[in-house]
Image (cartoon, coloured by chain):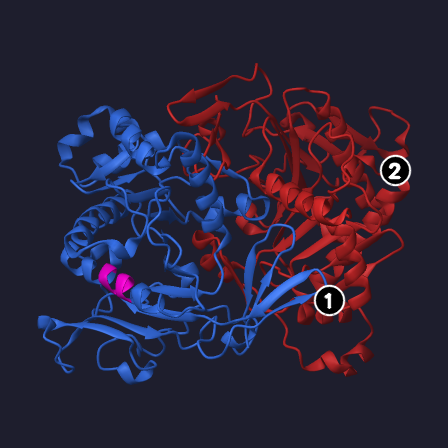
Chain colours: A red, B blue
Amino acid sequence: MPELRKDPVLGRWIIISKSRGKRPNDFSVEGYKTEDGFCPLCPGNEHATPPEVLAFREGDDGREQAPWLVRVVPNKYPALIIEGDLEKEGVGLYDQMNGIGAHEVIVESPDHNHLFADLSPKEMVLVFRAYSERIRDLQKDQRFKYVMVFKNHGSAAGASLEHSHSQLIALPILPRMIVSELAGAESYFRYKERCLFCDMIRQEIQMDKRVVCQNDLFITIMPFAPRTPFEMWVLPKYHSSGFCRQNDEELYSLAEVFSETMKRLNSCIPNVQYNFVLHTEPLRSGGLEHFHFHFEIVPKLTSIAGFEWGSGFYINPMPPEDATILMREALDDPAADETEGKNLPTLDVE
Amino acid sequence: MPELRKDPVLGRWIIISKSRGKRPNDFSVEGYKTEDGFCPLCPGNEHATPPEVLAFREGDDGREQAPWLVRVVPNKYPALIIEGDLEKEGVGLYDQMNGIGAHEVIVESPDHNHLFADLSPKEMVLVFRAYSERIRDLQKDQRFKYVMVFKNHGSAAGASLEHSHSQLIALPILPRMIVSELAGAESYFRYKERCLFCDMIRQEIQMDKRVVCQNDLFITIMPFAPRTPFEMWVLPKYHSSGFCRQNDEELYSLAEVFSETMKRLNSCIPNVQYNFVLHTEPLRSGGLEHFHFHFEIVPKLTSIAGFEWGSGFYINPMPPEDATILMREALDDPAADETEGKNLPTLDVE
């Protein structure tokens, strides 16, 4: 049985999950590797995964046998276990609980070679709908406090040709990252009576130095203090604290902006490896005035990670204003090379 | 000029330091690479570094020309600049200051192939004395609030044969990691009137499940909620909040335990890559009842980093109690293989 343990100094919870791999050097998160040409996430191999918990199919008419477009299955080697009661206990000054939770895999496309960045807005919106439906379903389980949705893309997170997928983990605790963001945003709100993120978006649009792309409803910006070159946040321009509160039209707008962001990123850094994480309100929050859901996209530039990993302190060699110029020029016609940005260097990654 | 920028949500400061490399893909922190067999950190090549700020020499009689044993030089491509006044400004809702600070390199041995883990306690204590003297010197500069001392070892932090060294960065702000630790430890102290770390050490010695090694004055434990397999903390068993307050005898005791810890780690995971970071009180603190200095050693197990990097949430596949058994058996005589730990798997790293 996995365990959740809390660091007594920082209040940070971690998962100890021994059972996920047979050996401790088997650090695979997914357990869905392509081996000998067999991919358990490809159509036709559905028997190789646990029974699906959600699927969107062609025609959307509910026919079980129609080909699926997006499919959600439990992780074969979950970090947390869905069955059981939540048991909390103290061990001296330490706190722990048993590892109750859900760990699911969202297969983003039936096409093995179709990357997330290749998805059209129409395809991508199905992925977002899957996130939303799964969160709303897991929200009914009173044991869970948060659902973390994230994607790892690149060899450090699995084989490079692995079938494109994202993951979600339902947790009986709030991750420290969310606790800290809620606290920061709430303290701003108490002082100003305004949402920090709404203010930030207004200022970014006005300054226009870190806006990557936008449509009527969504915007991608580079944060003022990014951890890495090309870190980006995708946010709704209207106030909304919970990802699940978006209707289909809003999700489509998000998909438009997200898809453009990923295509521009891939054009700036071919074969870029990255993580993204959905930052949304805790389950059953009922809407928060001070929080604003968003995605954080963090490109994985291998050689930079070394420094920050241990120290918790980030040195970023590229101002976000410079990276924004590169992102804006990407995908544009060759004439754009004549603009002021032409002397900016390109960014290689290992 | 580098900049320090604060994330308005999390209060996390980051450094934007464009000037460190000529190109944005030059992510080297040190700028001291071995090229064509020439190592700027080797004896005889002292002209290749900026003038040294500290050196310990053989015989310790102050002769400038005696061979050095440990040498501290400014980083050739510093992340922060030592010259100038600290200027703080707000840009709308954002906060920034110019990148005033110090960035130094501690060369741990004159021998190019001598790793930190190879140092004897007698050699290692000179490295710790260098940390201590540099922190005390930089403390006089009222612009600085914190000195962060850390070491990156392994290819992700530079070439694998690079001359062994650690680094320090003097900062005009407190790193968020330290702010959070101080807050957590202070809240415990307010409730209990005791140091959280002292309580933890007492409990660890009593439980004896996560104690790696110790002597009269220092102890290495695996934390209850480690981020990665083999994460370890080295702490004084007596209460002390500031690393610089230790006398020579105490530093020697630390070196004994630290050296044994590194040798055991290298035996468990040959060629292990790792970071360590010194967590000590802010400059000019005057001694804190609620804080306890320590080193955190975080082995870099490449494939695990992928998951946590973006999400800020850690899944650790190996309970620290299991890793402790492996560490305790390491370096022991072959008969130890007959004990209960013999079926524990060994840990490979990529």
B86 displayed left or right of B90: left
Pick whichever, B164 or B172, lies toward us: B172
For the residues labelled 2 and 1, say whether their Cβ atoms are less than 8 Å apart: no
Secondary structure type for disc 1 = helix
- Quarter residue A270 falls in: bottom right
Circle 2: residue type:
Asn
| Mark-to-mark CA distance, 2 and 1 | 29 Å
A259 displayed left or right of A13: right
Q: Residue at x 41, y 71 (%)?
A: B102
Q: Residue A84: x, y in percent?
A: 57, 14
Q: Residue A272: x, y in percent?
A: 63, 58
- Residue B191 sits above or below residue A294 on the image: above
Which chain letter goes with mark 1? A
A47 displayed left or right of A98: right
Q: Main secondary structure of the magenta part?
A: helix
Which chain letter goes with mark 2? A
| Mark closer to the chain start, 2 or 1 | 2
- Quarter residue A133 falls in: top right
What residue is shown with label 2? A247
In this rendering, the count of numbered labels is 2
Secondary structure type for disc 2 = loop
Start-end of magenta stretch:
B128-133
Pick whichever, A260 or A51, lies toward us: A260
Q: Is residue A17 magenta?
A: no
What residue is shown with label 1? A327
Circle 1: residue type:
Met
- Which of the two marks, 2 or 1, is nearer to us in this view? 2
Q: Residue furthest bottom?
A: B47
User: Can residue B153 be seen by looking at this rendering?
Assistant: no
Q: Is residue B132 magenta?
A: yes
- Residue A199 sits above or below residue A339 on the image: above
- Residue B131 sits above or below residue B313 on the image: below
